[in-house]
Amino acid sequence: MTPQDLIAEIQAKNSQISQTQILERLTAERTRTGGLLGDETLLRLIAAELGVQVQQATFQISNIISSGRLFAGLYDINVAGRLIAVFPVKTFGNEEKSGKFATLMLGDIDGLLRVVLWNEKAELVEKGELKAGQAVRLLHGYTRNDRYGKTELHLGTKSIIELQSPERTDAYPPLEQFTTKISNLTPNSGNVHLAGVVKSILGKTGFTRSDDSNGVVMRFALRDDSGEVTVVVWNEKVEEFEKLFRESTRFLLVNVRVKEAKNGTVEAHADSNTCISAQ
């Protein structure tokens, strides 16, 4: 469909908006996206915002796009970067539908992007073919907003994951660029990424949850070149950490939650939403 066809279809299905108003919104979207997307794509996004369903089409955007230029509602999107974290595969299901998914964190020149792999793409994680530190190209994905309103990339049946040569990793920021220095942590830091060496294990204890099931919590001291912080590891992440732990091993903790401890200092909490990897 041509842009003019789309404008006519939007007007036909929403008589309250004029062609002038549509063109004004189109001009605003061109400015917002920096000329990255064509008028057909922008008009489809405008139609979606207005609650108008127009004839569907796949957007052909062949170039690699940096994470900072993405927003929800895009199709056939290609990105590239360094894998910062690879989370374990999870399953879902009910009487109508079941499957599996895995989550990646991709770093590029603009920052971090959450990537969701569905079903057979998630099997690459199960097989150990995707690992933190690899340079990859993720092709033919689509974007959505997560529950917090942040854009993420999804890869399904038609998507392609290409591993790039080890030399290509130098084209992307190092893992450390995405971490926060321990000395900069405050009770208001929220979710952060940390890198450092385990100075000491502070203990492990079991506990009983409110539903009478058993849990386990471990504490250890993590140090970087700026300071030291206590990391609190919960439940299944305890076993994961213990398998990786070696003295003097450098750890990368992606997505830990910073909280104020009872003694007024800060702690970093690692749970099921945290990726722990040894470097």
Image (cartoon, helix red, strand yellow):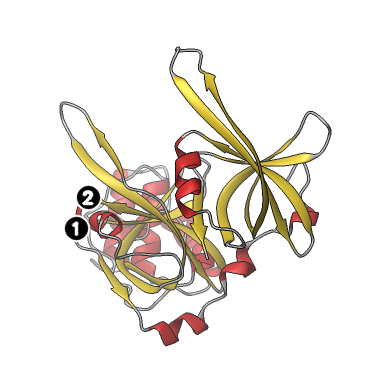
Q: How many marks?
A: 2
Instruction: Look at the numbered discs 2 and 1 and tell me whether their residues touch, using CB distance below 8 Å.
Output: yes
Viewer-side residue, 267 vs 11:
267
Residue beneath the point at 31% across and 62% down: 141
From the viewer's perspective, is 198 left or right of 234?
A: right
Q: Position of residue 182 (x, y in %)?
A: 74, 55
Badge 2 local density, few (<14 within 10 Å), some, or many (20+)?
some
Quarter residue 115 falls in: bottom left
Q: How far apart are marks 2 and 1 (CA)?
A: 8 Å
SS under mark 2: helix
Q: Which residue lies furthest to the bottom in this view?
A: 167
Viewer-side residue, 21 vs 237:
237
Which residue corresponds to mark 2? 119
Which disc number belongs to residue 157? 1
Residue beneath the point at 79% across and 57% down: 227
Quarter residue 201 falls in: top right
Residue beneath the point at 23% across and 66% down: 1
Frontmost of labels 2 and 1 is: 2
Q: In this view, does 41 lie above or below 173?
A: above
The numbered mark, 2 or 1, whose residue comes first in the sequence reads: 2
Q: Which residue lies furthest to the front in this view?
A: 247
From the viewer's perspective, is 27 left or right of 11?
A: right
Can residue 64 be seen from the camera position used here? yes
Q: Which amino acid, mark 2? A: Asn
Q: In this view, does 221 lie above or below 32?
A: above
Can residue 147 be seen from the camera position used here? no
Q: Where is residue 86 in the image (x, y as percent from the top left)?
A: 41, 57
SS under mark 1: loop
Q: In this view, does 207 lie above or below 137?
A: above
Q: Which residue lies furthest to the left in this view?
A: 96
Viewer-side residue, 204 vs 22:
204
Q: Which amino acid, mark 1? A: Thr
